[in-house]
């Protein structure tokens, strides 16, 4: 019993550590600054004990703060849900339709993906969000999206309070001349006598909080509409990308396939209810899902296997000709490489002269690929994949045969 209690305490401490990351620190700082300044400015502008409107305004402001923090912490600590380690489908024949995760030593269930930050296979993974320092997935998708809704609404309310506070406090203190504008912060208000003084420091803090509130409204509001777009189609951001690649693959090889996304139930309301429920717990167990009538449980995983095979076929072999230390913006690799580094959280990999890389995609100045490992690393399940400067590698001459094979496949 003591061992079980110790394990529970350790897991709780591990979850608390999520707070000590730059994402939650910045997010909670912004929430705290906007909320506290809005409360203080409400006392100055619209004292809640004087009128019914002031009381409603104050209660709504507290309500936004509670809803924002409730959904934020649930999104962080409830988590997305993880596929059990060493998981296998009940029917062993279904293994052929699934990808094997060497790190979790199990198979990836439909809609799950391995997160290298969480180091687990995540149920219905949408993305890893640095602001909650956790993945957005099956169990916390509703909490995360609700946070994206309430944060802009609360910031809009706070922004109105900031604007009205500055307007009412500065109205009698501004005097206009022929060639100047004067602000007398010591002038007393003729009508309203605030409980708290509105000094120059308070004005500067209010102006700064207004900028935070407006910036948060725009940035988080855009994320909310992106999330709702995929939720109403019962997709995740990753699955939308898989669907796009499926169409590209079919067009590239001129096949007669007709790919149907398997989880779109044909109704936005039905898709919406898969994520949002009155209980707060989404429908399903995170492994089996309701399907489109023309699809089965493994329609998407089969497409993923096809794309993985296609990726290997179209990869190009390169040899490393210049060492690279894995820096995000390397100064010694040219100005274009420095300034045009990929805007992504995907890793950069160190390169040593003589190593071999299989590149799968890239830009004019950077490439992305897998490093060829030795037998011991391969057996241990090690995988080194990421971005590196294009100038550090050169194409292997004997890879032209591989390219000609790809062209023949395309013609077929």
Image: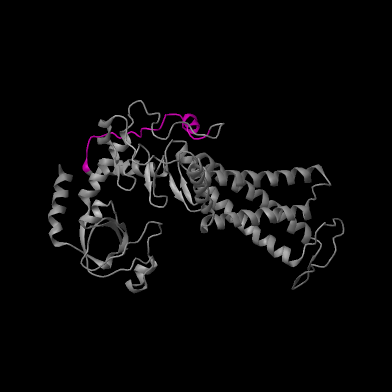
Question: Which x, y percent locates residue 128?
Answer: 44, 49
User: Residue 291 is drawn in which quadrant?
Assistant: top left
Residue at the limit of the structure toward the front, as seen here: 2
Q: Is residue 240 above or below residue 177?
A: above
286 within the magenta span: no
Above or below: residue 108 compared with residue 176: above
- Give the residue at x 34% y 45%: 104
Q: Main secondary structure of the magenta part?
A: loop
Residue 207 rendering spot, x and y as whole percentages: 67, 61
In this rendering, the count of numbered labels is 0
Q: Is residue 266 magenta?
A: yes
The one of 112 and 373 positioned closer to us in this rendering = 373
64 sits left or right of 144 in the view: right
Residue at 14%, 57% (x, y): give it. 400
For this orientation, the residue located farthest to the right is 190
Residue at 25 percent across and 31 percent down: it is 93
Instruction: Please indicate whether residue 82 sits to the left or right of residue 385 in the image.
Output: right
Q: On the rendered structure, is 179 left or right of 219?
A: right
Position in image of residue 238 (x %, y %): 39, 44
* Region of the chain picked out in magenta, as a range: 253-276
User: Residue 178's x, y, as percent?
Assistant: 77, 72
Quarter containing the C terminus: top left
Q: Is residue 11 above or below residue 210?
A: above
Q: Which quadrant of the figure has residue 247?
A: top left
Report the coloring of the rendering.
one colour
Q: Quadrant of residue 301?
A: top left
Q: From the viewer's perspective, is 333 left or right of 285?
A: left
């Amino acid at each position: 019993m003591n061992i079980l209690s110790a394990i529970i305490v350790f897991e709780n401490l591990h979850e608390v550590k999520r707070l000590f990351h730059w994402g939650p620190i910045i997010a909670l700082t912004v929430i705290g600054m906007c909320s506290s300044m809005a409360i203080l400015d409400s006392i100055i502008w619209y004292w809640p004990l004087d009128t019914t409107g002031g009381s409603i305004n104050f209660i709504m402001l507290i309500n936004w703060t509670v809803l924002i923090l409730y959904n934020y912490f649930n999104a962080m600590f409830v988590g997305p849900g993880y596929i059990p380690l060493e998981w296998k489908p009940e029917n062993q024949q279904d293994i052929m339709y699934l990808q094997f995760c060497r790190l979790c030593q199990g198979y990836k269930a439909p809609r799950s993906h391995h997160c290298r930050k969480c180091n687990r296979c995540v149920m219905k993974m949408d993305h890893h969000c640095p602001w909650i320092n956790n993945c957005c997935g099956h169990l916390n998708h509703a909490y995360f999206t609700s946070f994206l809704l309430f944060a802009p609404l609360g910031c809009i309310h706070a922004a109105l309070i900031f604007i009205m506070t500055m307007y009412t406090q500065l109205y009698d203190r501004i005097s206009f001349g022929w060639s100047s504008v004067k602000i007398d912060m010591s002038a007393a208000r003729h009508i309203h006598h605030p409980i708290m003084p509105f000094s120059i420091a308070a004005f500067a803090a209010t102006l700064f909080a207004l900028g935070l509130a407006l910036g948060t409204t725009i940035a988080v509001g855009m994320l909310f509409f992106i999330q709702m777009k995929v939720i109403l189609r019962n997709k995740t951001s990753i699955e939308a990308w898989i669907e796009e690649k499926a169409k590209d693959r079919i067009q590239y090889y001129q096949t007669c396939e007709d790919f149907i996304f398997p989880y779109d139930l044909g109704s936005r309301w039905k898709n919406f209810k898969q994520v949002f429920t009155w209980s707060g717990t989404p429908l399903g167990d995170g492994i089996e899902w309701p399907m489109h009538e023309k699809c089965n449980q493994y329609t998407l995983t089969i497409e993923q296997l096809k794309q993985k095979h296609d990726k290997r076929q179209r990869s190009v072999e390169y040899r490393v000709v210049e060492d690279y230390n894995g820096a995000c913006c390397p100064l010694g690799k040219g100005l274009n490489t420095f300034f045009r580094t990929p805007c992504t959280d995907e890793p950069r990999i160190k390169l040593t002269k003589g190593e071999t890389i299989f590149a799968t995609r890239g830009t004019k100045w950077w490439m992305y690929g897998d490093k060829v490992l030795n037998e011991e690393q391969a057996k241990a399940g090690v995988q080194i994949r990421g971005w590196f400067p294009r100038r550090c590698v050169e194409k292997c001459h004997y890879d032209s045969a591989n390219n000609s094979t790809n062209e023949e496949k395309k013609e077929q």
